[in-house]
């Protein structure tokens, strides 16, 4: 439904205290900043954990005295324990997948862009929006606290498979006690946050568009964020169910996932459970989760490529339909993570077909991105560079997915570094590149100042070189099992000793480059070049967020909300004096609506 301009009466201005403006804010712009800075905090923690375990993998026989100073009993003698190594890997995966690439990415850009780009004063429910952030914050607080308890954080892998994580009092590993309970409690609050946010985003997009803003005039980031919210609403409840039943097994000795467990030579009293059931429930979220991460990235990149190519997005409707098909097929491929569970090969072949089918809409998007920039008047801003980097990462990471989508190839590759390389490039690094692009592009809209471009280019070139230096070699480490704490005891694996050092060096360089990015954000937010009222549309873009004043207002626009007359990608049309035609600009005589 489209609202008239007058139905968006501006919110009555009221005096705000420090608490209501900066802490318990209900303004979508401030909540976007809260998600951004919380995401930055978690990305530093998650990346730091990976640096620590890369020290172990690169130099397994060396000692690092500073680690004992930093970590105490978990690194006695300057060498991390095997228990702590698994905690590091578990928390690294959990933090980056959920807290950074889900909440940090969607939370920041959904809150910033949805009201701005559809022409709304705020979200449908600002209060629910605030709750969404604070549930996320509490979730993070609980996860953070698990790093400091005596028995250590969860250490059973970010997927939390039973039976390893299904028994609380058996001391299978130290982290399987309180640390795992805190992990599940934290994830429960995180799921509540995601559901509150997702419902709010969908309701806002469907009900609060300004006059003239039909669905086919929405910018692609809004389409992507809506599909992402739908995915989350449908996929997160099964994970909540899986986690709840696993906690029942752990605390009340039920047998949802446990059966025929032998400990110390004694058969335990668990009967009739199936650990495979947990895997089905987990991956029914886990694979849509990949698209919950990558769809917002696709939307952000589509917008930035068009703006900085000075060309309309090629195949706008095909882009939207491709997003929809990805959502649909995203629910039909989860068991490709489970080829090694002994599933019926016929069932496996069905998942192979759907997995290869989902490559088609992804390929449509890649083709459309390349065609959008083809013969464009490219402006290679840091945001544009990271968007091009995203396309590069998405293609190179996606190609290895075609290998892994085939069960006959996946089974021998499943527990090797080939899989680590695949999902880090296509889901991790690619999504980070899109997030960086979004921050560089919309930073002036968020903070009223510009990021430093020189630092931006250093950040880009250093990060893309480091990312490929880390993950390309892993594709060739086919005989190396993942999840091993040390390889030095195995003569077979010693051939990879120098490669592991090489990877670890670039992991450290990459981490330092991200610290440079954080410094750029903090410095620029305080001291960067200001965006003035004469230059409120620095990228000469068409979407509505660039019609709002440089100074943030409660309600976004000081008067009536602009009425929309055209789609958001009228670049280089030949009409007017400029090469862009903002959405609120009426059509000229002879000009056709897209």
Image (tube, rainbow, N blue to C red):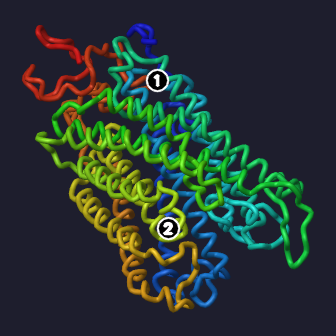
Image point 55% across, 40% down: which residue? 331
Looking at the image, is 259 positioned above or below residue 4?
below
* Left-right relation of 498 to 465: right
Nearest the viewer among 335 and 264 is 335
* Left-right relation of 161 to 312: right
| Residue 230: percent from left, percent from top | 54, 32
Residue of label 1: 205
Crowdedness near tag 2: few (<14), some (14–19) or many (≥20) residues, C-alpha within 10 Å: some
Image point 55% across, 33% down: which residue? 198
Q: Looking at the rendering, which quadrant does residue 258 occupy?
A: bottom right
Image point 51% across, 92% down: which residue? 491
Nearest the viewer among 280 and 162 is 280
Q: Residue furthest front?
A: 346
Foreground disc of the pair 2, 1 = 2
Q: Secondary structure at mark 2?
A: helix
Question: Which quarter of the image is occupied by the C terminus?
Answer: top left
Task: Answer whether labels 2 and 1 touch (C-beta < 8 Å).
Answer: no
| Residue 22: percent from left, percent from top | 51, 40
Q: Secondary structure at mark 1?
A: helix
Image point 17% across, 13% down: which residue? 592
- Disc on the earlier residue, 2 or 1: 1
Residue 29 can be seen in this image: no
Crowdedness near tag 1: few (<14), some (14–19) or many (≥20) residues, C-alpha within 10 Å: many
| Residue 501: percent from left, percent from top | 40, 83
Residue of label 2: 413
Cα distance between the residues tagged 2 and 1: 42 Å
């Amino acid at each position: 439904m489209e609202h008239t301009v007058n139905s968006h009466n501006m919110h009555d201005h009221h005096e705000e205290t420090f608490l209501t403006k900066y802490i318990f804010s209900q303004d979508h712009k401030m909540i976007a900043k809260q998600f951004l800075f919380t995401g930055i905090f978690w990305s530093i923690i998650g990346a730091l954990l990976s640096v620590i375990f890369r020290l172990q993998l690169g130099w397994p026989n060396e000692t690092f005295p500073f680690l004992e100073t930093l970590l105490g009993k978990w690194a006695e003698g300057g060498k991390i324990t095997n228990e702590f190594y698994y905690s590091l890997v578990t928390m690294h995966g959990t933090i980056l997948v959920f807290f950074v690439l889900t909440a940090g990415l969607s939370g920041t850009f959904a809150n910033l862009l949805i009201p701005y780009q559809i022409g709304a004063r705020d979200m449908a429910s600002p209060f629910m929006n605030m709750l969404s952030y604070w549930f996320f914050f509490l979730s993070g607080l609980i996860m953070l606290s698990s790093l400091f308890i005596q028995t250590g954080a969860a250490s059973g892998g970010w997927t939390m498979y039973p039976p390893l994580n299904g028994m609380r009092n058996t001391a299978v590993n130290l982290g399987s006690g309180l640390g795992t309970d805190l992990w599940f409690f934290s994830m429960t609050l995180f799921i509540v946050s995601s559901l509150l946010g997702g419902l709010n985003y969908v309701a806002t997009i469907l009900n609060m568009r300004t006059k003239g803003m039909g669905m086919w005039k929405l910018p692609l980031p809004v389409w992507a964020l809506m599909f992402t919210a739908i995915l989350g609403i449908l996929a997160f409840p099964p994970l909540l169910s899986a986690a709840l039943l696993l906690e029942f097994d752990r605390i009340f000795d039920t047998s949802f996932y446990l059966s025929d467990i032998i400990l110390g030579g004694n058969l335990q009293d668990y009967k009739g459970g199936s650990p495979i059931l947990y895997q089905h429930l987990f991956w029914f979220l886990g694979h849509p989760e990949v698209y919950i991460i990558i769809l917002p990235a696709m939307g952000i990149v589509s917008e930035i490529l068009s703006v900085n190519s000075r060309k309309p997005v090629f195949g706008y409707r095909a882009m939207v339909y491709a997003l929809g098909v990805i959502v649909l097929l995203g629910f039909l491929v989860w068991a490709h993570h489970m080829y090694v569970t002994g599933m019926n090969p016929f069932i496996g072949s069905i998942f192979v077909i759907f997995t290869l089918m989902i490559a088609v809409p992804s390929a449509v998007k890649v083709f459309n991105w390349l065609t959008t920039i083809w013969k464009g008047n490219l402006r290679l801003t840091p945001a544009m560079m990271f968007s091009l980097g995203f396309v590069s990462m998405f293609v190179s990471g996606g190609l290895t997915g075609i290998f892994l989508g085939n069960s006959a190839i996946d089974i021998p590759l499943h527990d090797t570094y080939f899989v680590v390389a695949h999902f880090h490039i296509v889901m991790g690094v690619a999504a980070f590149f899109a997030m960086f692009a979004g921050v560089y592009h919309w930073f002036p809209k968020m903070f009223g100042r510009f990021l430093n471009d020189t630092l931006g280019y250093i950040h880009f070139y250093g990060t893309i070189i480091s990312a490929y230096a880390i993950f390309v070699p892993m594709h060739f480490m086919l005989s190396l099992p993942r999840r091993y704490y040390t390889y030095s005891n195995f003569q077979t694996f010693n051939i990879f000793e120098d490669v592991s050092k090489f990877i670890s060096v670039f992991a450290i360089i990459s981490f330092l480059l991200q610290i440079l990015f954080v410094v750029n954000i903090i410095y620029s937010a305080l001291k960067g070049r200001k965006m003035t009222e004469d230059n409120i549309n620095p990228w000469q873009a068409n979407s509505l967020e660039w019609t709002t004043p440089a100074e943030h207002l409660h309600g976004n626009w000081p008067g009536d909300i602009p009425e929309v007359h055209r789609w958001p990608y009228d670049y280089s049309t030949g009409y007017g004096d400029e090469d862009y035609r903002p959405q609120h600009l009426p059509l000229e005589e002879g000009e056709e609506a897209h």
